[in-house]
Image (tube, helix red, strand yellow):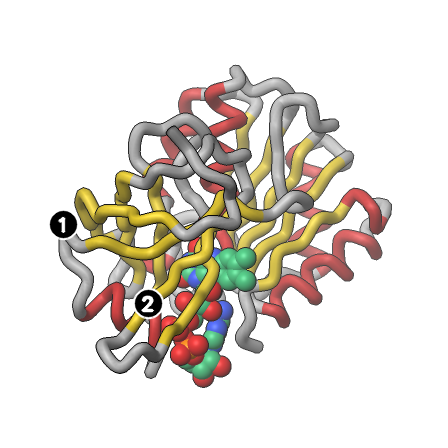
Amino acid sequence: MTSPAADWQQAVIARIEQRTSRMRSYFLRAPLARHIAGQHVDVRLTAPDGYQARRSYSIASAPGAEELELAIELLDDGEVSGYFHDIAQPGDTIDMRGPLGGHFVWDAAQAGPLLLVAGGSGVVPLVSIARAWAAAGGPVPALLLHSARQWDGLAFRDALFAIDTAHAGFTYATTVTRGAAPHGYTRRLDKAMLDDLLAQWGHMPALCYVCGANGFVEAAAQLLVAAGVAPRAVRTERYGGT
Ligand SMILES: Cc1cc2nc3c(=O)[nH]c(=O)nc-3n(C[C@H](O)[C@H](O)[C@H](O)COP(=O)(O)OP(=O)(O)OC[C@H]3O[C@@H](n4cnc5c(N)ncnc54)[C@H](O)[C@@H]3O)c2cc1C
């Protein structure tokens, strides 16, 4: 039995996996309705004195997966991310509601070619979209560009390389803004990089999903529109920060 997305439910942490030095995946058993790739949940923590903190977290798992996967990056002085990294353990119960979000969602009926652009932890909903895309048999050409500070900060790198290897229609591209990388670009996303990527890919995107901190999303969306993508074809999800 599932309840409406607005109702708070109790989810149990089944297991925890380290993704990068600052990001962990939390696999939950949650009595929520099946999500659409790109959606998120709200999490609520309650202190013994009744103080509550609520945050949103994207769903990384594919629709229909047995466990709901959230991937949470530890922020300096982060109240809720700090709780997840320092205190949460398998077996713990978390208040959660969802799935939520009706605009930043993808299913196999959407137009292609499909361009996914992530900054840092903004890769999480795009991993769900990439997994849903693979489960649907790769219905349209798809390219995912992930920008992170360091090579080791490219969360889900192995999973995305695996989709790239298994599906001719999927391209996984990376850029790191600090330090070296064995593949991909080593600078911030800019016009020359986008032009180069689109030329190598050989497609003009009909639909783009951009996710990350506010500044990254703003800059990437502007570059896409300047490259000739219609503004209405650019869907964005902003995580906050600068
Ligand atoms: C729809 C949606 C989906 C999200 N999905 C994810 C997800 O899948 N994984 C994930 O790790 N986060 C995700 N976030 C961000 C998440 O909701 C929290 O904002 C984040 O975990 C910080 O919360 P906190 O309590 O740890 O930090 P806070 O105590 O709120 O803030 C600590 C410090 O970090 C700064 N800060 C807050 N948010 C950010 C940010 N995004 N980037 C940089 N600095 C920031 C604050 O200004 C403050 O200085 C999502 C946000 C939205 C709106």
**Residue holding disc 2:** 45
**Residue holding disc 1:** 91
Across the whole image, how many numbered discs are drawn on residues?
Answer: 2
Q: Nearer the viewer, residue 113 or 242?
A: 242
In the picture, measured across the screen, residue 112 lies left or right of residue 3, that is: right
Q: Residue at x 22, y 48 (%)?
A: 13
Residue 87: give x, y in percent of width and height.
Answer: 17, 68
Residue 198: give x, y in percent of width and height.
Answer: 70, 41
In the picture, measured across the screen, residue 70 lies left or right of residue 224, that is: left
Q: Quadrant of residue 77?
A: bottom left
Whole-Å distance between the Cαs marked 1 and 2?
16 Å
Task: Say which label, 1 or 2, has the lower sequence index.
Answer: 2
Instruction: Report if residue 148 is visible in the image.
Output: no
Q: Residue at x 35, y 59 (%)?
A: 72
Q: Residues within 10 Å of mark 1 (few under 14, many from 20)?
A: few
Residue 73: give x, y in percent of width and height.
Answer: 35, 63
Report the amino acid beneath label 2.
Leu
Tell me if the residue at label 1 has its CB under 8 Å from ligand 1.
Answer: no
Q: Residues within 10 Å of mark 2 (few under 14, many from 20)?
A: some
Instruction: Report if residue 204 is visible in the image.
Output: yes
